[in-house]
Amino acid sequence: MRPTLNLFAKASRLPLNSKKANKDFYKGTGTGNIMRRKRLAVAIRTTGEQLYDEFDRPRTWNLMTHRLDEARIPSYIVPPGMADSRLRPLVFLGEKEDQGKGKDRPLPGYPMGHKMKARAGMDGAYYEQMREDIIERRDLRDASERDLSRAKTHK
């Protein structure tokens, strides 16, 4: 018995997708690069009128002329009220001279405890400090609870 040849003939011609390829394979969404489009500015968006250049030819954008019609390029508008909110983008919007200055970032570490050194991270010394702080806070809490219970019994 022999397997049918049909199964082997077209097996390698199936389209490649991210499930069949390695981890670095990214096919994209198929939208392409806006700068590589052949015809960007051929008509007015709202009315649909054909646009013409200075020689009365239908106006187009291509890689030779490098002219863009800004009406055809996607733009992103801030929703109303968003500019006044406290939300900020995750980019630096200040002056170049101010970059890296101003507010210090909080160092990582246990809340209400010592902060880690930026380069050292979670090392043995930090762990020991954190453990001592927790034990000290626990002892203080227990002592205050004992004092409260004694005060209640003496009343």
Image (cartoon, rainbow, N blue to C red):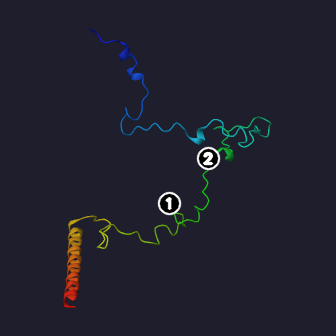
Tell me which numbered mark, 1 or 2, is placed earlier along the sequence: 2
Instruction: Tell me the crowding category of disc 2: few under 14, some 14 to 19, or many 20 or more residues within 10 angstroms, Cα based.
Output: few
Q: Is residue 2 above or below residue 107?
A: above
Identified by mark 1, the residue type is: Val
The percent coordinates of residue 44 (x first, y second) are: 73, 42
Instruction: Tell me the crowding category of disc 1: few under 14, some 14 to 19, or many 20 or more residues within 10 angstroms, Cα based.
Output: few
Residue at mark 1: 91
Residue toward you, 67 or 130: 130
Identified by mark 2, the residue type is: Pro
SS of the residue at dot 1? loop
Residue toward you, 101 or 137: 137
**Res 127 → quadrant:** bottom left
> Which numbered marker is on residue 74?
2
Give the left or right position of residue 29, taking residue 16 as reference: right
> Which numbered marker is on residue 16?
none
In the rendered image, the residue lying farthest to the top is 1
At x 40% / y 18%, what residue is drawn?
10
Per the model, the C-alpha gap separating discs 1 and 2 is 21 Å
Q: Quadrant of the N terminus?
A: top left
